[in-house]
Image: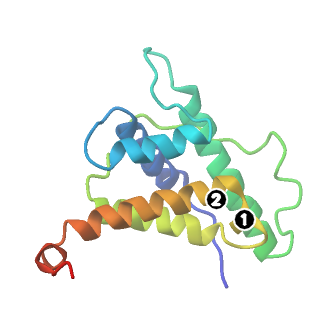
Amino acid sequence: MSCFIIEDKSINKIVDFFIECAYSKEEFKPEITRIINSYGYDLTYNSDDENPNANKLGLQMKKLNLMAYNDCYKNKLDGVFDESVKFKFDYDTKRENNLIQMLKHIQCFIYQCSEGDYTEDKFYLTFVKIEKVLIGYIISHLDDYKKAKWE
């Protein structure tokens, strides 16, 4: 299996989507918020300042990806897991409005973090749960699904 380091802009799109979910009562979004909150990331923030949990979530995503990459390529990144790993949420991220594209971002993240023993990690499994919610929502809104018989 191959692995690559996900760009910060892709992590930003995922975190931005989770922030959008935190402020929405629309269909599946409260379920995604519940999953993120269960891991300790409340992304609602009533201030003009930066959302500290957005930065923490993005940083944890980046570190998980780097650890999986490191396992895949046998410690090519020796020593990068100290304070030198940085992530700053970009509030100017262009919002991803296409749910299928968002699903692909999340699936790419899951795939790129699946090296090593990380597939049993609670943080990794958080994204697997979110992927299932999105897949279920997308499929349930397809015309063929709506036309299919319940039998």
The x and y percentages for residue 89 are: 52, 37
Q: Which residue: 36% across, 67% down?
A: 135
Disc 1 from disc 2: Cα separation: 7 Å
For residue 36, side relative to residue 63 (left or right): left
The x and y percentages for residue 55 are: 58, 35
Quickly name the residue at label 1.
Answer: 120
* Disc 1 element: helix
Q: Depth-wise, is mark 1 or mark 2 nearer the camera?
A: 1
Mark 2 residue type:
Tyr
Please say whether residue 17 is visible from this viewpoint.
no
Mark 1 residue type:
Glu
- Above or below for 1 versus 54: below
Verify CB contact (< 8 Å) between mark 1 and mark 2: yes
In this view, the residue farthest toward the bottom is 1
For residue 71, side relative to residue 19 (left or right): right
Out of 45 and 85, give the one closest to the viewer: 45
Quickly name the residue at label 2.
Answer: 124
Q: Which residue: 51% across, 46% down?
A: 35
The x and y percentages for residue 63 are: 71, 52
